Amino acid sequence: MASSTCALALVLALSVGASVARGSEPWWNETQVYTTTANSGGSNGVFVGLTLIQSAAAKGAVCLDGSLPGYHLHRGFGSGANSWLVNLEGGGWCNDVSSCVFRKGSRRGSSNHMERQLQFTGIMSNRPDENPDFYNWNRVKVRYCDGGSFTGDGSDAAAGLYFRGQRIWQAAMDDLMAQGMRYANQALLSGCSAGGVSTILHCDEFRGLFPSNTRVKCLADAGMFLDTVDVSGRREMRSFFNGIVRLQGSGRSLPRSCTARMDKTSCFFPQNVLPNIQTPTFVLNTAYDVWQLQQSVAPRTADPQGLWSKCRTNHAFCNSNQLQFLQGFRNQMLDAVKGFSASRRNGLFINSCFAHCQSERQDTWYANNSPRLGNKKIADAVGDWFFERGDAKYTDCPYPCDGTCHHLVFRGDH
């Protein structure tokens, strides 16, 4: 059993106040304001300015509020000058008119509210001591302002909403190709959370941008949102994803390899798209994803008596019955990737941590005390897989056996 001194706990320093019903992810992804019980090691990554895609308006490729989409590009150098890492930003979804109207007043729905500079950390860092394999690549973060994982194609004139995620994806790729990505000798598409879903949904499209002799792969971090039953017996994520697909007209953009055999909502779930992806893909996920624990496994709506309120905020307070339920969730996660992981070209890193998103934070991607499986840090495992240096399939034993986790712990229920 892991001792409390081994497992790094991240204690959130603000109240976390979002829910699936409101169409947004918990605010820890928004602000990353937390204190730690151990030295997590900050990043010295570069700050990169926002570029608005001027050609997007003519294509109707606009954010929820009609503003221009954008990205942050830091140019590669040396041996990485012709290598491209394209990261699709995450940040929840909106599944009805009211949640999308709320969202368009934020940086998740309008470039008018986006930061003009973002720090590139983890897999985006420009420092070899923080990001050994990709530090000198061209690294791009495509901002997320459509609320539908870059899939929507529609609008709601009465509400002043544009659902243009698929067009934003295309406009961003067109612009990046013109910026030199068409000369790439290798490329990696990545994203975490909602961006992890986007990565899986768009992976083969990304592959199709390049000649067949270009090495192209995809990395999905914390994107395995499962079509699972919550503690009250309902399928919270299915009803939520169904709202997105219906509202935003996402069905036309979802991979046809899936929609040819399943309904459109099922094809928003990565577990149903993975089996037919043609492009080599790496799945990075925690077996006890805290976003899903809080929002779709044991959401407050499914727990009116508050029996899960302590477990939701701190895994150490989960009782034996709750842990047994969560072990069942872990088993579903492992089952969902079983066929996928049988392919030699794919990679896997599923650690038994209560966390969410591990590739873009420095402390979990590559630091002295980063999580490990098979004595490999996440950055090492992803690098081994991309460059084909060796096997890159790592599955953890069940909680609480892993003492290298960086667990997320929250102050108070939300």
Image (spheres, rainbow, N blue to C red):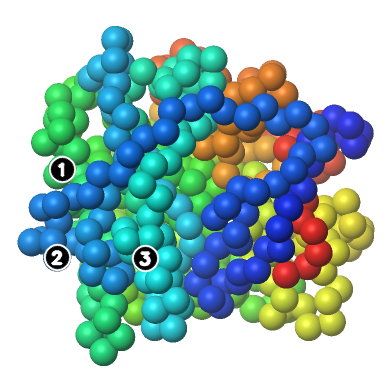
Which quarter shows the C terminus?
A: bottom right
Give percent across and percent down for residue 361.
57, 36
Left or right, 151 with respect to 127, comes to left
Q: Is residue 327 visible?
A: no
Q: Position of residue 289 (x, y in %)?
A: 65, 52
**Is residue 177 or residue 205 the one in the foreground?**
177
Residue 98 image point, x, y percent: 44, 83
Q: Is the residue 76 above or below the residue 94 in the image?
A: above
Does residue 90 appear left or right of residue 84 in this picture? right
- What kind of residue is marked 2? Gly
Q: Quadrant of residue 7?
A: top right
Describe residue 2's horizontal placement relative to residue 44 as left or right: right
Bin the neighbour count of mark 3 within 10 Å (Cα to Cα): few under 14, some 14-19, many 20 and up.
Answer: many
| Number of other residues with Cα within 10 Å of mark 1, as a class: few under 14, some 14 to 19, many 20 or more | some
Q: Which residue matches tag 2?
A: 60
Q: Tell me the quarter of the image containing the N terminus.
A: top right
Q: Is residue 212 above or below residue 300?
A: above
Q: Would residue 179 appear left or right of 226 to someone viewing this image?
A: left
Lower position in the chain sequence, tag 3 or tag 1:
3
| Residue 175: image tag | 1
Amino acid carrying label 1: it is Asp
Between discs 2 and 1, the one toward the N terminus: 2
Residue at 52% over, 30% down: 122
Secondary structure of the residue carrying tag 2 is loop
Q: Residue at x 53, y 25 (%)?
A: 44
Disc 3 secondary structure class = loop
Considering every residue shown, the one lying at the far left of the view is 58
Find the distance from the CA under tag 3 to the CA under tag 2.
15 Å
**Residue behind mark 3:** 109
Separation of disc 2 and disc 1 at Cα?
Answer: 14 Å
